[in-house]
Image: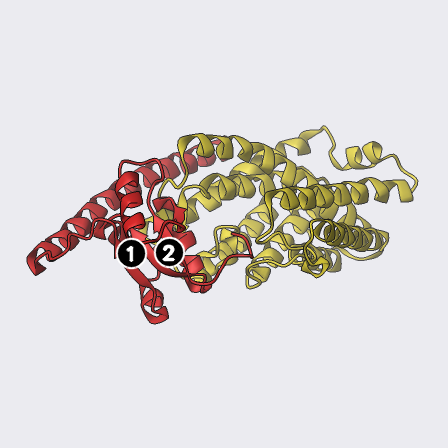
């Protein structure tokens, strides 16, 4: 349960930092952890605070257990055959999401159109692989490498996956967001990522799955417009939140279970 | 979008450095709307958001086609604009155009949009198919 405590402390640090930044910028500190309708500078400051809080949590947890962070996380990223699972996870996520997008384009639930000027488009697209790699690595270290690994010390696999998925989904709604109905999608995604971590006892597979999903979501965002109903196709920030997306996640989970011989 | 925005401001949907910018500027000056906020046509959904938030009460397009493109693309929910009583005007209003001319303009715009949509779908389908095939190929190696 130490990891949950560290996570709560990081959340508190993040909230206090955001409130302070808002206050310094002359905005209500009650605006808390929201980045909506704030200046670019304030947004960037809040982003830095978020990243520093997460990094602090990721580094603090192994230290509190008396382990070097690099040694601890290195143990969860073994350079053996399991490292290949990263590639498999990546391409599996790309395949599933690509098929979903194809179906939606064919049925006019998704429309493609270039929104930005060439320069801006190029800079956005250039940042996508880094965002995917960094986002996946950070979240996997935090939620699977820290939270689920810690839960597994005191709980069985099923409760660890269930609680881990709940924490992962809940963490995405700590700050004020535009939509909350995507929670169920985050919960199912959390289930997939936690389960693949438990099955492989390594972070490679969840990192690959996560990175593939982020890559295609961010890579298509400058081009897509969701015209279908949200319950079916989700939202541009999270296409897995719709009914088809959640079904895809469940199928992907079964596929990973069949491949990695899960024993839940 | 800042929070200090005055209510019911005027929005202009036109490229600020495009070929129609000069005509738009002239129109805005003649209508005493020089303080209007400019949006690029691809950002017309931001105008829609501002309209629905009650920040914009008047939207100026370059011409009828600009509005129709936004409607066909479903970038705006025009029924919401109508119920909100938002005023819409055109810099090139083609004042006194006959019903036939208006119907022709609407039909041509619809036809153009359908052709464009077909092209977009073709390109999107080709790119997505390539991505899916590569992913499938790698997974079966």
Disc number for residue A2: none
Chain of the residue where label 1 is placed in the rendered structure: B
What element does badge 1 sit on?
A: helix
Q: Residue at x 19, y 49 (%)?
A: B109
Q: Position of residue A77 (x, y in %)?
A: 73, 34
Q: Specify the colour of chain B.
A: red
Q: Residue at x 34, y 71 (%)?
A: B83
Q: Which quadrant is home to the C terminus of chain A?
A: bottom right
| Along the viewing direction, whichever of A14 and A157 lies nearer the viewer | A14
| Along the viewing direction, whichever of A211 and B110 lies nearer the viewer | B110
What element does badge 2 sit on?
A: loop
| Mark 1 neighbour class, 10 Å CA radius: few under 14, some 14 to 19, many 20 or more | some
Q: Residue at x 35, y 60 (%)?
A: B58
Q: Position of residue A144 (x, y in %)?
A: 72, 47
| Along the viewing direction, whichever of A164 and B46 lies nearer the viewer | B46
Q: Which one is closest to the eye, mark 2 or mark 1?
A: 1
| Left or right of residue A159, residue A260 in this image | left
Disc number for residue A227: 2
Chain of the residue where label 2 is placed in the rendered structure: A
Does label 1 lie on the same chain as label 2?
Answer: no
Q: Specify the colour of chain A.
A: yellow
| Separation of marks 2 and 1 at Cα, in angstroms | 12 Å
| Left or right of residue A2, residue B33 in this image | left
| Left or right of residue B123, residue A84 in this image | right
Judging by the rendered image, the residue that carries numbered circle 1 is: B71
Residue B140 visible at all: no
């Amino acid at each position: 349960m130490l990891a949950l405590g560290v996570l709560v402390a990081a959340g508190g640090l993040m909230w206090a930092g955001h409130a302070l930044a808002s206050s310094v910028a002359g905005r209500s500190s009650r605006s808390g952890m929201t980045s909506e309708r704030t200046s670019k500078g304030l947004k960037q400051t809040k982003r830095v605070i978020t990243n520093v809080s997460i990094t602090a949590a990721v580094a603090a947890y192994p230290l509190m257990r008396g382990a070097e962070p690099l040694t601890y996380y290195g143990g969860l990223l073994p350079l053996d055959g399991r490292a290949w699972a990263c590639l498999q996870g990546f391409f599996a996520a790309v395949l599933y999401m690509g098929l979903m997008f194809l179906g939606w384009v064919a049925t006019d639930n998704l429309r493609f159109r270039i929104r930005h000027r060439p320069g801006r488009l190029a800079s956005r697209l250039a940042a996508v692989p880094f965002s995917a790699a960094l986002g996946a690595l950070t979240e996997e270290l935090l939620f699977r490498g820290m939270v689920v690994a810690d839960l597994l010390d005191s709980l069985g696999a099923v409760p660890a996956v269930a609680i881990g998925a709940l924490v992962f989904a809940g963490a995405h709604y700590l700050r004020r967001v535009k939509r909350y109905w995507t929670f169920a999608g985050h919960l199912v995604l959390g289930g997939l990522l936690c389960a693949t971590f438990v099955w492989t006892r390594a972070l490679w597979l969840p990192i690959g799955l996560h990175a593939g999903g982020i890559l295609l979501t961010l890579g298509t965002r400058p081009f897509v417009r969701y015209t279908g109903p949200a319950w079916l196709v989700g939202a541009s920030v999270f296409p897995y939140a719709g009914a088809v997306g959640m079904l895809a996640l469940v199928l992907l989970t079964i596929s990973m279970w069949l491949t990695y011989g899960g024993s839940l | 979008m800042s929070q200090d925005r005055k209510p019911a401001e005027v929005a202009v949907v036109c490229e600020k450095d495009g070929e129609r910018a000069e005509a738009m500027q002239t129109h805005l000056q003649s209508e005493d709307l020089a303080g209007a906020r400019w949006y690029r046509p691809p950002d017309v959904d931001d105008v829609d958001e501002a309209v629905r938030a009650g920040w914009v009460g008047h939207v100026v397009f370059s011409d009828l086609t600009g509005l129709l493109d936004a409607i066909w693309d479903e970038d705006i929910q025009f029924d919401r604009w109508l119920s909100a009583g938002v005023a819409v005007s055109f810099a090139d209003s083609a004042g006194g155009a006959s019903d036939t001319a208006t119907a022709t303009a609407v039909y041509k715009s619809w036809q153009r949009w359908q052709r464009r949509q077909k092209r977009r779908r073709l390109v999107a389908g080709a790119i997505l198919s390539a991505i899916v095939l590569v992913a499938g190929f790698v997974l079966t190696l």
